Image: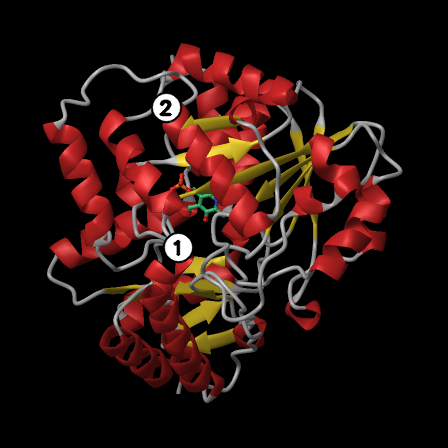
Amino acid sequence: MSKALSNRINSLPVSQTLAMAAKARELKEQGKDIISLSLGEPDFNTPDFIKDAAIEAINQNYNSYTPVDGYGELKEAICTKFKRDNNLDYQPNQIVVSTGAKQSIANVAQVLLNPGDEVLLPAPYWVSYSAIAMLCEAKFIEIPSSIDNDFKITPQQLEEAITPKTKMVFFNSPNNPSGSIYSEEEYRALAAVLEKYPHIYILSDEIYEHINYGVKPFSFAAIESMYDRTITVNGLAKAFAMTGWRIGYIGAPDWIAKACTKMQGQITSGTNCIAQRAAITAVLASPDKVQYMVDEFRSRRDIVLDLLGKIEGFKLNIPEGAFYIFPDVSAFFGKTIKGKEIKDANDFSMLLLEEANVATVTGDAFGAPECIRMSYAASELQLREAIKRIKEVLS
Ligand SMILES: Cc1ncc(COP(=O)(O)O)c(C=O)c1O
């Protein structure tokens, strides 16, 4: 690291999911037959009806700067979607469209957090939450969970983590990396705690909402007492296979939305015009139109659970959504496999990469150091082959 770089960037960790993907790519380029189960990206193409809307937008000469908070038509469409899918009443002035949900989350953190504020992260959590909090010089406090309680925190744990400095709590359901979904009842129990602490804001990241296997996710802002202090985050990347299109959005109290617009106006301005026009079509489409992807993910999940369940040492929960398996692999810690000592999940994930040529991500990155994350956004053939190789290495 150059000394000329700011303390801010020097202290920022590299995203471990991206680092693992880069390492896998490097090995592939060296000629190794790597199966990558490390990235959180659907392996489908964007549906044609969305691509057509983008092509039409290009032909209609959508090429100018866009309004910072997004096209009015798109914000209206997002309000319709929030009512249709989440029973949430938002007006267009409460919506801000951004360059991916990642930017939406970064905006919210930047406008709400002061140095020294505490952010509660129920673990396991998506890797960028902690980095985004760090960039705001806030302190992130992990609330641990384990596979034995389906990777969910209890109201008591939440209450114990709260201090006068707590400013925000980040919820994510369906969850990356665990696939767990909080039920309405579980969310209401957590909200009952938060009702006692009106100084705390809630970020509810619902980007995997459509990728669920029967348990319909519940929106935190649908709890009346929470609506005025919840920021609902969503985006198109996961459900519509549009990761590269970079569209995310929030529904939030008007004053928070305004602040996010101000922040975004100085950093990126409004997001890409073509992607926004296509997004109008995507958010207004019935979720049934992408059900074929969800059905495919479900079938792969079942295959992976079945095959991994036959390998001694893998402790599994049944993920109800998203496209990850998050096994507890602590049974392997302290063992020596293929001459390599496995002290922790980092060693285990490295063993799988080097000996089985399968890329996964260590649970450390998600605040769950006894687990690894495996994405099943890969073909059935690749998944079967990957697990066969893992089994061979471990036996
Ligand atoms: C939980 C979670 N939130 C947000 C994002 C970011 O989404 P986007 O690609 O829209 O920035 C991801 C992407 O991996 C995610 O897993």
Its colouring scheme is secondary structure
Horizontally, residue 383 falls left or right of residue 322, namely left
Quarter of the rendering occupied by the N terminus: top left
Neighbour tally class for label 1: few under 14, some 14-19, many 20 plus, Cα within 10 Å: few
**Quarter assignment of residue 232:** top right
Q: Count up the numbered dots.
A: 2
Amino acid type, callout 2:
Tyr
Amino acid type, callout 1:
Ser
- Residue at the spot x=12%, y=56% of the render? 30
Residue linked to disc 2: 71
Residue 69: image location, x then y, percent? 43, 20
- Residue at the spot x=72%, y=31% of the render? 228
Decide if residue 102 is in sight here: no
Decide if residue 49 is in sight here: yes
Question: Considering the numbered disc 2 on the image, is that residue within a helix, a strand or a loop?
Answer: loop
Report if the beta carbon of the residue with label 1 is closer than 8 angstroms to ligand 1: no
**Quarter assignment of residue 275:** top left
Residue 243: image location, x then y, percent? 31, 45
Residue 322: image location, x then y, percent? 46, 60
- Residue at the spot x=53%, y=63% of the render? 179
Q: Nearer the viewer, residue 183 or 114?
A: 183
Horizontally, residue 57 falls left or right of residue 308, namely left
Residue 358: image location, x then y, percent? 30, 67
Question: Considering the numbered disc 1 on the image, is that residue within a helix, a strand or a loop?
Answer: loop
- Residue at the spot x=33%, y=65% of the render? 293
Q: Nearer the viewer, residue 344 or 309?
A: 309
The numbered disc on residue 245 is: none
- Against 361, residue 134 (above or below) is above
Residue linked to disc 1: 286
Quarter of the rendering occupied by the C terminus: bottom left
